[in-house]
Amino acid sequence: MGRSSSTRCDPDVAPAVERIRSSRDYRRVYRRGLRLHGDIAVFHVRANDVGHPRLGLTASRRVGGAVVRNRLRRRVREHYRQQVSRDLLPAVDVVVHLKTAAAATDRSRFYSELNRLFRAVARRKAGRSRRRSRR
């Protein structure tokens, strides 16, 4: 029995994060999604057709070196996996674009800001308002 089969049955283990993987999906969220600005990140949010929330992460080199960027991405993924319930968010794609301030922010402030932004996503109708029509 592999590791993945045992963790899926364990109620104490949070499920794996459903992630946005294709560049096409990233572009769609960036172009037509709703933006929520925070101190450490900008959340780009758009409704999806897959029936559950998905997470995408981006961080430019201005945030820091590869080690710093990857550490911040891991923190966001782990926080999302443990703290953000699939029931909290509607079927949306959320791309978290980390700002340069994220690298200098202490953990407690980092996580409280993520909580605030994810709650804001849950309150919104995921890109339905403020969506511009394309002609």
Image (cartoon, grey):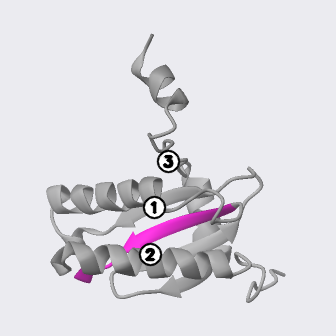
In which quadrant of the rendered view does residue 42 lie? bottom left
Q: Give the range drawn in magenta.
A: 92-102
Instruction: Inspect the image, locate mark 2, and give the three-letter code of the amino acid beneath it.
Output: Asn
* Residue 130 falls left or right of residue 110: right
| Residue 34 is a magenta residue | no
Instruction: Inspect the image, locate mark 3, and give the three-letter code of the amino acid beneath it.
Output: Val
The spot of residue 29 in percent (x, y) is 62, 68
Nearer-the-camera pick, 20 or 74: 74
Mark 3 neighbour class, 10 Å CA radius: few under 14, some 14 to 19, many 20 or more: some
Secondary structure at numbered mark 3 = loop
* Residue 128 falls left or right of residue 6: right
Q: Name the residue under label 3.
A: 17
Mark 2 neighbour class, 10 Å CA radius: few under 14, some 14 to 19, many 20 or more: some
Q: Name the residue under label 2.
A: 115
Q: Does label 1 or label 2 sit earlier along the sequence?
A: 1
Residue at the image position 38 percent from the left and 60 percent from the top: 79
Q: Report the label total.
A: 3
Residue at the image position 47 percent from the left and 45 percent from the top: 14
Residue that lies at the very extreme toward the top in this rendered image: 1
The spot of residue 121 in percent (x, y) is 60, 77
